Image: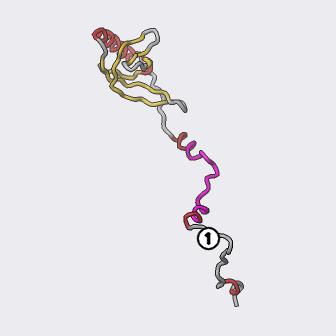
Amino acid sequence: MGKYDDILNIKRPVSKNHQPMPIENRAAQFMPFAALTGYDDAVAETARYTEEKIELTEEKKAEINEKLSDLELKLRDGDRVVTVTFFVPDELKSGGEYVTREIRVKRIDTYKGTLVLSDKTEIWINDILSLLI
């Protein structure tokens, strides 16, 4: 005779006062518990790649300034659509990303050092990597 033979074949007790829990709710008891809420998001944020801003050479700065001068002349006739690659700093961590966009330039604000777009947003001239007029 085995150690647990006396209880192996006993039926499961059923309460006379409470309804049995539905299977869907029983399964929820055994779901994994996230003890560190937000940990996965923090790990994903840390793993997210950002680029460092490229320090332009004097030749590249001169090339961009020349294109900005050409653009300024063409803006006298009205808004101008150009393709620009510029650095967008990341709001959450150091670095950022370079984006290339086709934009409509309204004017160049030399005092602030920005391109003013037709939708009133601005791009810092120091963040421009390339400019195609």
Residue 9 in the magenta stretch? The answer is no
Give coordinates of residue 115: x percent, y percent. 40, 16
Does 120 sit left or right of 34 as displayed? Answer: left
Q: Residue at x 32, y 13 (%)?
A: 71
Q: Residue drawn at (70%, 86%), measured in percent from left and top?
A: 6
Figure check: 30 above or below 42: below
Circle 1 crowding by C-alpha within 10 Å: few under 14, some 14–19, many from 20: few
- Answer above or below: position of 83 versus 14: above
Q: Quadrant of the N terminus?
A: bottom right
Q: Residue furthest bottom?
A: 1
Residue that numbered label 1 is attached to: 20
| Residue 64: % across, % down | 36, 16
Q: Residue at x 58, y 61 (%)?
A: 28
Identity of the amino acid at label 1? Pro
Q: Point out residue 101 in the picture as x, y percentages from the top left corner.
A: 35, 27
Query: Which percent across, then down, holds residue 35?
Result: 64, 52
Which region of the structure is painted magenta?
26-42
